[in-house]
């Protein structure tokens, strides 16, 4: 699957962090594909979760789309 933000390849598997405050990683079922820039780049979610969410909304908002596409495969 391409990056859910920009459609680029290759992607990293991003464990969703929106709404989470602890250090425990989200389960592998709560992941979305993000390209390296959207994931860890200067404007990526790990650079500034707040700024990323203001631009794209919470990362968990993409989970239903990803799960639907996986089921279709």
Image (cartoon, grey):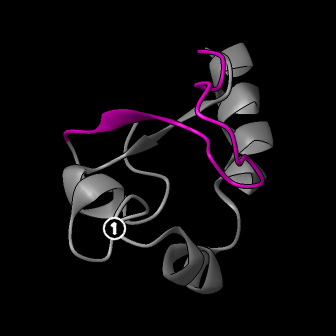
Query: Which residue is depicted at the point 64% across and 20% down?
Result: 70
Q: Position of residue 67 (x, y in %)?
A: 73, 27
Out of 69 and 50, give the one closest to the viewer. 50
Residue 49 percent across, percent down from the top left: 52, 68
Seen from the viewer's position, the closer of residues 10 and 50 is 50
Question: In the orientation shown, which residue stands out farthest toward the front?
Answer: 22
Taking the magenta stretch, the answer to whether it contains residue 16 is yes
Count of marks, rendered view: 1
- Horizontal arrangement in the rendering, residue 63 relative to residue 12 (left or right): right
Magenta portion: prevailing SS class: loop
54 w.r.t. 22: above or below: below
The residue beneath circle 1 is 47
Figure quadrant of the C terminus: top right
Does the magenta run of residues contain 13?
yes
Quarter containing the N terminus: top left
Residue under the image location 67 percent in, 27 percent down: 30
The percent position of residue 41, horizontal first and vertical second, equals 21, 65
Where does residue 36 sit, x and y in percent of width and height? 21, 51
Relative to 54, say whether 49 is above or below.
above
Which segment did they paint magenta?
A: 10-28
Element under label 1?
loop
Residue 24, above or below 35: above
Relative side of 5 to 40, left or right: right
Q: Nearer the viewer, residue 14 or 35?
A: 14
Dividing the picture into quadrants, the one containing residue 64 is: top right
Q: Residue at x 69, y 54 (%)?
A: 18
Q: Identify the image quadrant of residue 7.
A: bottom left
Badge 1: few (under 14), some or many (20 or more) residues near its Cα, within 10 Å? some
């Amino acid at each position: 699957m391409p990056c859910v933000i920009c459609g680029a390849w290759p992607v990293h598997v991003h464990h969703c962090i929106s709404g989470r405050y602890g250090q425990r990683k989200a389960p592998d079922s709560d992941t979305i594909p993000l390209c390296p820039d959207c994931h860890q780049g200067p404007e990526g979610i790990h650079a500034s979760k707040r700024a990323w969410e203001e631009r794209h909304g919470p990362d968990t908002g993409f989970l239903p789309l990803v799960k639907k596409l996986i089921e279709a495969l």
